[in-house]
Amino acid sequence: MKALRLADSNASPRLIETTVPAPQPGPGQVLVRISATAITPTELDWYPTTHTSSGQPRTGAIPCHEFSGTVAALGEGTHDFTLDQAVFGMNDWFAAGALAEYCLTEASSIAPAPLTLTPIQAATIPISALTAWQGLFEHGHLHPGDRVLIHGGAGAVGIFAVQIAHLHGAHVIATASAHNFDLVRRLGADEVIDYHTTRFEDAISQPVDIVFDTVGGDALLRSFPLLKPGRFAVTISSDKESSQDPRIQHAFFIVKPHQRQLMEIAALIDTSKLVTFVDAAVPFSQAAEIYSNSSSHRSGHGKVVVTIAPAS
Ligand SMILES: NC(=O)c1ccc[n+]([C@@H]2O[C@H](COP(=O)([O-])OP(=O)(O)OC[C@H]3O[C@@H](n4cnc5c(N)ncnc54)[C@H](OP(=O)(O)O)[C@@H]3O)[C@@H](O)[C@H]2O)c1
């Protein structure tokens, strides 16, 4: 199968096209014929891209761990899926990713694709929506009526965090650029703060129950004084991963695949309670370029998706 893998040097482009054997599913695994996959630009520098799960240096990683596609082969014991079924999901960060014609995943990491979305739209969902879901419910312990501060409400993760918190009955305060105010309000934010012109701590008069930091920098540190005692701050920003501050260590998490959550998210999509956005869709031949020049492709909302032509 054709795939893009990380080159051995940091020269641009950092990804090179290669041909590798298509993997075969073992027990509990599904081989997915990839229709589309979405790009997380920072992923090339993440720990699991450059290290194996046992901590050894990793070379030649295939990035992109969220995808939509169809079932190409089933391993033993994968009774929940059928051949050619449309699925979406994400696989383990240490496994070979989906910037390839085929991708191997645990069956428990995927779910039937939303019925109302195209494969390109479906590929934008798994990482961003699961990150928002896990950040709010598992790490933030969200309850109806909570006041939730979301840093980066117009980003790919923020878009889902705003919607899910709103759907769950929270009072949502989001930071964003002014040109994104209409969007973020439409998705359910009750208050929006322009982080370019206003220090958010000056605009928030009441304490909050949850801080959800998607932007990094000093946003989280500046948010701690706003948090009600005993409530939760969460951050997904990788610049926090190695922090020595115990509050930040406690707040940081990395999204995990989760079948039941994907099914709940798909149901919300199919009943029009959640929406997703495609920033751009590019062919496989342009994927490497996106990583080396990602900002020029981020004019809209949501993620940049790579369409993969399946092998015949
Ligand atoms: N740990 C994990 O499991 C995990 C999972 C997914 C993503 N991530 C990481 O999380 C980060 C966000 O991901 P994403 O996909 O949502 O990125 P994204 O789509 O690029 O969105 C980033 C958003 O941040 C906003 N922003 C930038 N500086 C800001 C500031 N000072 N205050 C408030 N908002 C600010 C921008 O908003 P405006 O456009 O309104 O200016 C932009 O929309 C990335 O670093 C990504 O790698 C981590």
Image (cartoon, rainbow, N blue to C red):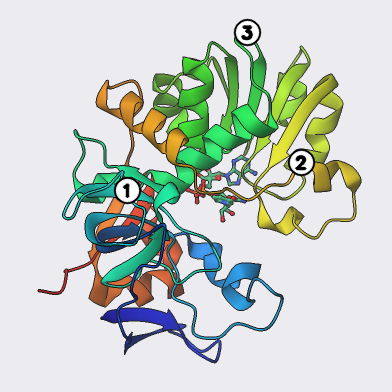
Provide residue 176's location: percent of width, then percent of height. Answer: 54, 35
Q: Which residue type carries mark 2?
A: Ala
The CA span between labels 1 and 2 is: 28 Å
Of labels 1 and 2, earlier in sequence is 1
Looking at the rendered structure, the secondary structure element under dot 1 is strand
Residue drawn 18% across and 44% down?
Answer: 118
- In which image quadrant can residue 259 be found? top left
Question: Which label is found at residue 264?
Answer: none
Residue situated furthest left in the rendering: 312
10 Å crowding of disc 1: few (<14), some (14-19), many (20+): many
10 Å crowding of disc 2: few (<14), some (14-19), many (20+): many
The CA span between labels 3 and 1 is: 32 Å
Provide residue 39's location: percent of width, then percent of height. Answer: 41, 60
Q: Which residue is mark 3?
A: 145
Q: Which residue is mark 2?
A: 251
- In which image quadrant can residue 138 be found? top right
Residue drawn 16% across and 54% down?
Answer: 84
Q: Which residue is mark 1?
A: 88
Residue 145 in the figure: left or right of residue 185:
right
The CA span between labels 3 and 2 is: 21 Å
Q: Which residue type carries mark 3?
A: Gly
Residue drawn 43% across and 65% down?
Answer: 294
